Image (cartoon, grey):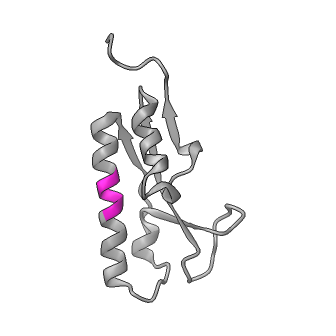
Amino acid sequence: MTQSIVVQVGQCGNQVGCRFWDLALREHAHVNQVGVYDEALSSFFRNVDQRGADSSGDKITALKARAVLVDMEEGVLGEILQGPLRSLFSSTQLISDVSGSGNN
């Protein structure tokens, strides 16, 4: 079993990354309609319970993306946390700075 961690950097990287997560969820839902946490899903997602600990059951409880999101500005990351995929990410997976990249 392989497990990958996706690193999304910058506005473009985070926007493309969100499209990736959306597509990955849709494809798995189309192929696996019974909601089982299988090896294919475990490559990119963790299955967590209500306490946030990894769930060892076969049934999907809550999925968290194996990802680190990095951006100089908080705007894009804020949109992700308020968007339709907000349940996939926790605030500990986001790294940002308030200075922005306008003066670089």
Q: Quadrant of the N terminus?
A: bottom left
| Magenta stretch encompasses residue 98 | no
Q: Position of residue 74 (x, y in %)?
A: 46, 31
| Left or right relative to 20: residue 49 | right
Identify whether 103 is placed above or below 7.
above
Task: Identify the image quadrant of the C terminus.
Answer: top left
Answer left or right for 71 relative to 50: left
Q: Position of residue 29 (x, y in %)?
A: 37, 78
Identity of the residue drawn at 43% across and 47% down: 80
Residue 30: horizontal and vertical position, in percent? Answer: 31, 81
Q: Which residue ends up furthest to the right in the rendered image?
A: 51
Specify the principal SS of the magenta part.
Answer: helix
Magenta residue span: 18-22
Q: Where is residue 58 shown, x and y percent of the image?
A: 56, 83
Up/down of 101 relative to 24, above or below: above
Q: Quadrant of residue 43?
A: bottom left
* Residue 8 or residue 72, whichever sits in front: 72
- In the rendered view, tell whether residue 2 sits above or below residue 6: below
The answer to whether any part of residue 69 appears in the image is no
Q: Residue at x 33, y 50 (%)?
A: 17
Name which residue lies at 49% across and 83% down: 36
- The residue depicted at 44 percent of the width and 39 percent of the height is 77
Look at the picture and state if 81 lies above or below 95: below
